[in-house]
């Protein structure tokens, strides 16, 4: 486990630096290198890479003695695995990939907060013969990267619809390139709106989104809780009309063994400096740092809504303090 929490950050020093104040805590100032954390993000071309970089940069700037570095990954399922193995201390995941069959979080993990909602995209080229979901039968379809939220949710909808596609496992950037080059017939993408890989493709080639009304309804019925009806707006991608689909919340996870005061400070920086997060950070594949529109969805009202996944005690303490 890559975690160095010595010397320990004093509760008062961390919270003062993050904009909070709790009585009765030590006034000892944190020393440099107090907490070195790793945050699991996602693959190239994904919103997870962009918003994860923003969060890491912002927390590093706002919480003295804390350094957060990002770890590229396959996304949701891969991030959960790394968290449980102690390879990272923070990670992004979609809520449906996180909730186990009994409605609980994986052992040893809890939520810092809900961040933003992803929308399930099913993308084809404008001249494709695919007009509806059932036309995916036998077609070459990217299911997203291995261990990603896209893979998890796209396999669910295919199984519910009993559609057998020729599945390929590609990152969002690789999926968009393969679709453009005719190497696949369609691509799934569970991501924020807009997402860089699809935005770039739509600017270069004409594309369509396949409506997912029936698939959304099937998910609501089979798996109550993590899904909600949604629409990709007409303003999202060049030349693409508004399209009905399904939305899935994304949460920031933490290992349960992270100190409460540190998670309190991280939570405080996320919700008191949202405007900064929208303009922070850039990974080596992402767009300009000022373009992180998903961060505008971050707010206190929805941030506490993590369904059956419990909040980390430090995050729960921050939300309680907001009520007083």
Image: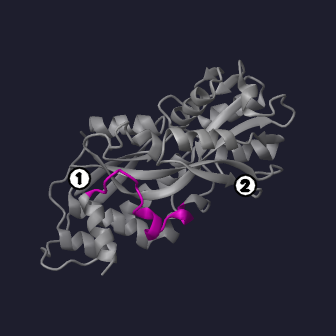
Q: For the residues carrying marks 1 and 2, which lies nearer the camera in this image?
A: 2
Residue 113 lies in what quarter of the image? bottom left
Task: Give the quadrant of residue 265.
Answer: bottom left
Q: In which quarter of the image is the C terminus?
A: bottom left
Instruction: Quadrant for the N terminus, please.
Output: top left
**Which label belongs to residue 128?**
none
Q: Mark 2: which secondary structure?
A: loop
Circle 2 residue: 236
Asked if 65 appears above or below 110 in the picture, the reply is: below
Query: Which region shows up in magenta?
Result: 295-312
Membership of 277 in magenta stretch: no
Circle 2 crowding by C-alpha within 10 Å: few under 14, some 14–19, many from 20: some
Which residue is at a point 22% across and 58% down the rendered structure image? 34
Residue 256 seen by the camera = yes
Q: Is residue 185 left or right of residue 71?
A: right
User: Magenta includes 304?
Assistant: yes
Name the residue located 14 percent from the left edge and 58 percent from the top edge.
7
Q: Mark 1 points at which residue?
A: 258
Q: Position of residue 136 (x, y in %)?
A: 72, 26
């Amino acid at each position: 486990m890559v975690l160095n929490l010595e010397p320990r950050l004093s509760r008062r020093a961390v919270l003062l630096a993050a904009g909070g104040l709790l009585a009765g805590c030590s006034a000892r100032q944190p020393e440099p290198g107090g907490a070195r954390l790793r945050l699991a993000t996602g693959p190239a071309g994904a919103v997870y890479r962009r918003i994860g970089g923003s969060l890491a940069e912002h927390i590093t700037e706002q919480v003295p003695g804390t350094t957060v570095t990002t770890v590229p990954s396959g996304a949701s399922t891969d991030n959960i695995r790394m968290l449980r193995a102690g390879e990272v201390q923070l990670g992004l995941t979609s809520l449906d990939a996180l909730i186990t069959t009994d409605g609980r979080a994986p052992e040893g993990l809890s939520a810092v907060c809900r961040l933003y909602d992803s929308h399930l995209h099913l993308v084809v080229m404008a001249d494709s013969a695919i007009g509806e979901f059932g036309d995916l039968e036998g077609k070459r379809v990217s299911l997203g990267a291995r261990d990603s939220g896209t893979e998890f949710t796209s396999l669910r909808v295919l199984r519910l619809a009993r559609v057998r596609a020729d599945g390929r496992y590609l990152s969002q950037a690789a999926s968009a390139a393969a679709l453009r080059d005719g190497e696949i017939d369609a691509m799934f993408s569970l991501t924020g709106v807009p997402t860089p890989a699809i935005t770039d493709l739509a600017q270069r080639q004409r594309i369509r989104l396949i409506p997912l009304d029936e698939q959304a309804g099937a998910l609501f019925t089979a798996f109550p809780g993590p899904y909600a009806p949604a629409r990709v707006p007409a303003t999202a991608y060049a030349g693409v009309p508004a399209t009905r689909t399904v939305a899935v919340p994304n949460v920031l996870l933490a290992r349960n063994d992270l100190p409460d005061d540190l998670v309190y400070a991280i939570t405080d920086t996320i919700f008191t400096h949202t405007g900064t997060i929208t303009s922070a950070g850039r990974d080596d594949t992402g767009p300009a740092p000022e373009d992180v529109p998903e961060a505008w969805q971050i707010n206190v009202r929805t941030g506490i809504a993590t369904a059956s996944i419990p909040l980390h005690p430090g995050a729960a303490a921050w939300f309680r303090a907001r009520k007083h």
